[in-house]
Image (cartoon, helix red, strand yellow):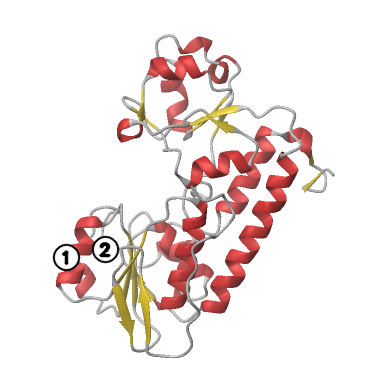
Amino acid sequence: MAASGTTHATVPPTAGWPRTITDDTGATLTLQSAPKRIVSLAPSNTEILFALGVGDRVVSDTESCDFPPEALKLPHIGGISAGDLERIEVEFPDLVVAVGFINQKLISALRAAHITTLVVQPHTTADVMTSIRLIGSAVGKDKEAQRITADMSTRLDQLRTLTSHAEVRPKTLVVYGVNPIYTSPPDSFIHDLIGVAGGSDVVQTPLPQNIISPAVVIERAPDVIICAPSLRERLKALPGWSIVPAVKNDRFYSPPGDGGLTRPGPRLVPGVEQLARYLHPELFDLTSGRGKH
């Protein structure tokens, strides 16, 4: 697994048009000119496109795209995993940006319809960096993508150095759903970021379908549970969980509602900085917002 904040994969620099790009599925795309009508099929891709400065070229996105606020005003092609091919076609896109493990069925349909589709697969933090650079190359914003990822890497390295001074690394579990309890795999960016924030993910080996049993959670005794606010009371009510340290001490962390910590895009960095402040307030000067040295 690539170290978080370190981008081993590279995107070859490109100059001018036409340009040829190989995406994360191994597909080769040839773009004759900078795309002017872009459809985004995932909130993370929408955020990347706006961060790159091409939000004005995005003609449609999904119902789940809620950041930045301008994304909410765009026509939507449907839900994040449902998407409607016909609604995409009427936008006459010259580029569709998809996430492989979310949009798999729609990607096949788009390519069968000969619609230029760039697919990213951001599993680890390093993959997120590569996704930003791939999308940047596809839309002609190579320098902006390099600047964004360099800044992200620098801030992650600084945070990792700061949290390395923590005396204790709280055992942490991220939960996305109850009955069953869905969590993240150990090769995911959220696993990377828990480590950067100074925590220790209780999930260290792959789980079938990323489902962890209530009994295993009790056994692994997380000190902190990361989850949506709506899940807190349901988790507290699970049989036997009153002895789980996170439940006993009411240590539930809910990322901001707009997905900064859980979406593979530029806002992962402020998201993990907020998590670090929650896990290790002793390491931060809260009056200045800067870490203690």
What residue lies at 16% left-to-right and 68% top-to-bottom?
Answer: 86
> Seen from this angle, which residue lies furthest right?
293
Circle 2 packing at 10 Å, graded few (<14), some (14-19), many (20+), is: many
Which residue occupies the foreground of this view, 165 or 291?
165
Q: Position of residue 220 (x, y in %)?
A: 50, 19
> Gap between marks 1 and 2, in whole Å?
14 Å
Q: Amino acid at mark 2?
A: Ile
Contact flag, marks 1 and 2 (Cβ < 8 Å): no
Q: Position of residue 52 (x, y in %)?
A: 52, 72
The quarter of the rendered structure image containing the C terminus is: top right
In this figure, which residue is indicated by the disc labeled 2?
A: 77
24 vs 279, left or right, is: left
Circle 1 packing at 10 Å, graded few (<14), some (14-19), many (20+), is: few
Q: Position of residue 134 (x, y in %)?
A: 44, 70
Which residue occupies the foreground of this view, 180 or 288?
180
In this figure, which residue is indicated by the disc labeled 1?
A: 109
Q: Amino acid at mark 1?
A: Ala
**Sequence-wise, which precedes: disc 1 or disc 2?**
2
Q: Is residue 59 above or below residue 181?
A: below
What residue lies at 47% left-to-right and 71% top-to-bottom?
Answer: 11
Q: Is residue 72 above or below residue 281?
A: below
* Residue 242 tag number: none
Image label count? 2
Q: Nearer the viewer, mark 1 or mark 2?
A: 1
Element assignment for label 1: helix
289 vs 62, left or right, is: right
What residue lies at 30% left-to-right and 80% top-to-bottom?
Answer: 94
What residue lies at 40% left-to-right and 85% top-to-bottom?
Answer: 34
Element assignment for label 2: loop
